[in-house]
Amino acid sequence: MSAPPTATGRARISARTLRTDRWWLPPLVTFLALLAFVVYGVIRTFMNQWYWVPDYHYLAPFYSPCLSVACVPGASHWGQPAPDLGPLVPPPIFVLPFVLGFRLTCYYYRKAYYRSFWASPPACAVGEPHRRYTGETRFPLIMQNVHRYFFYAALVVAAVLTYDTVIAFRGADGGFGIGLGSLLMVVNVLLLWAYTLSCHSCRHLVGGRINHFSKHPVRYWFWTKVTWLNGKHMLLAWSSLISVALVDLYVMLVASGALSDPRLFN
C-alpha cells in the first residue's frame, strides 16, 4: 500500500488572490459607512448642545441617559450623579463606553471592522496581508471576550431609551401628543431592542446549557424567537446604527430651531 499523503502547508500562489470579482467593494463601503458614523459621533459628542427639546421631551440618543451636572435642565431623567468635568468630558462620555463596548465586541461588527479597517483578512479567498495572526488571544483583542457582559449594559441602555420614547409622547400644552420625532424614536427603540436581543450572547443565555429542549418549553420558545432574530443580526446591526444617528440628528435640528417638529396630534 502506498503511504498516505502528508500535509505540505497552504497552497503557494504568486497572486494575492485568484478572485476576479470586485471583492474590495464590500469592505470599502463598510469602511466609509463606519467612518462616517464615527466622525458624526465624535462631533456630536463634543458639540454638547441641542440635545433636549423641552416642549416635547425629546432627548437625543447620544445624550441618554444624561447623568452629568452639566446636562441642561430637564434632560436628566435619572439624576445627575456625574460631576461637570468641563468641555473635554461632555455628558455622553459617561455612557458611551458601555454602548460602544457592546457594538465593538459584537460578533458581526468584529467581522466588519476586521475586514474594512485592518484587512484581516479583507475578504474571503484573499491573502492575509499581515505576517502574524494571533486571533483574539492577546491584548487588546482578548477584550472581545467581555461581550457577554456588555450585553447586560446594552439591556439597561435600551430600557432607558424606551423610557425616553414613552415620555416623548407629549403635547405642547403638557398633555398627550404625537409628533414626527416621537414616531422616529419608536422606530429607533424597536430596532435597538431587536438588535440587542438578536445578539449571540442573548441566544446562548436563553438556550445554552440545555440538553433537552422538550423539558424546557418556555426557554425553547424564547430560543426559537431569538434564533430567528439572530439570523438577521447583520441587518439589525446596520439599521439600528443608522436609526440612532438619524434620530439624534433630528432631535438636534429640532432643538436648535433649524427644523419644526410636525405634529400629528396636539
Image (cartoon, rainbow, N blue to C red):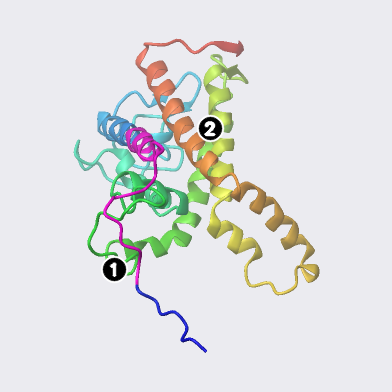
> Where residue 161 sits: x, y (%)?
51, 38
Q: Nearer the viewer, residue 40 or 45?
A: 40
Determine whether the residue tagged by mark 2 lies in a helix, strand or loop: helix
Q: Residue at 30%, 43% (x, y): give it.
A: 93
> Where residue 152 sits: x, y (%)?
50, 56
At label 1, counting other C-alpha atoms closer than 10 Å, the crowd grade (few under 14, some 14-19, many 20 or more) is few
Q: Amino acid at mark 2?
A: Asn
Q: Is residue 133 above or below residue 224?
A: below
| Magenta residues, start to end | 9-34
Q: Which mark is residue 188?
A: 2
Determine whether the residue tagged by mark 1 lies in a helix, strand or loop: loop
Residue 121 is one of the magenta-drawn residues: no
Question: What residue is disc 1 on?
Answer: 138
Q: Nearer the viewer, residue 16 or 110?
A: 16
Q: Residue at 42%, 16% (x, y): give it.
A: 254
Q: 146 left or right of 1?
A: left
